[in-house]
Amino acid sequence: MFRVTENRFVIGPRSFDGSFRLLRMPDGLALSARSWDDVWAACPEFNVPWRAIGFSDLVVRQQVLDVWGDHPDMPS
């Protein structure tokens, strides 16, 4: 599990433009992502370990899978 002070990304609901919200925790910086590549590219730039990524809920997880497809490094 993540330490409370460790930066992490939470992939959230889909926006009107088709991207998904990418929220850096714990500070709440909000970004957007249109693909897995966007998520992985943001990790080093925003000091987030690439394994410190999760989904806001199971509905969002399924929506991401439907739009972006499965990825071998995606969070569970």
Image (cartoon, rainbow, N blue to C red):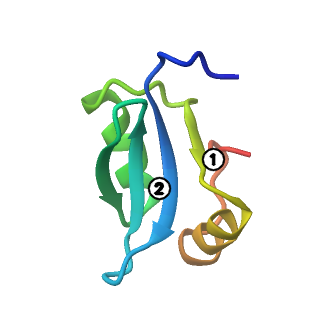
Of all residues, the one furthest to the left in this rendering is 45
Residue type at the position of mark 2:
Trp
The residue nearer to you, when weighing 30 against 61, is 30
The furthest residue to the bottom: 16
Dot 1 or dot 2: first in sequence order is 2
Q: Are marks 1 and 2 in contact (CB under 8 Å)?
A: yes
Position of 19 with respect to 64 (left or right) is left
Q: Position of residue 63 (x, y in %)?
A: 62, 74
Looking at the image, which is closer to me, 21 or 75? 21
Image coords of residue 18 (percent x, y): 38, 80
How many numbered marks have been drawn onto this rendered protein structure? 2
Residues packed near mark 2 inside 10 Å, few (<14), some (14 to 19) or many (20 plus): some
Q: Is residue 49 above or below residue 13?
A: above
Q: Considering only vertical position in the picture, is 2 above or below 23?
A: above
- Seen in the picture, residue 67 relative to 23 is either above or below; the reply is below
Work out whether 63 lies above or below 46.
below
For the N terminus, the quadrant is: top right
How far separated are the C-alphas under marks 1 and 2? 8 Å
Left or right? Give the position of 30 relative to 59.
Answer: left
- Disc 1 residue type (three-letter): Met
- Secondary element under disc 1, as helix, strand or loop, is loop
Disc 2 is placed on an element classified as helix
Q: Mark 1 sits on what residue?
A: 74
**Residue 36's disc number:** 2
Q: Is residue 57 left or right of residue 15?
A: right
- Residue 76 is situated, as x and y percent measured from the top left of the image, at 74, 46
Local packing at callout 1 (Cα closer than 10 Å; few below 14, some 14-19, many 20+) is some
Residue closer to the observer: 76 or 41: 76
Q: Which residue is at a point 28% across and 31% down the rendered structure image?
A: 46
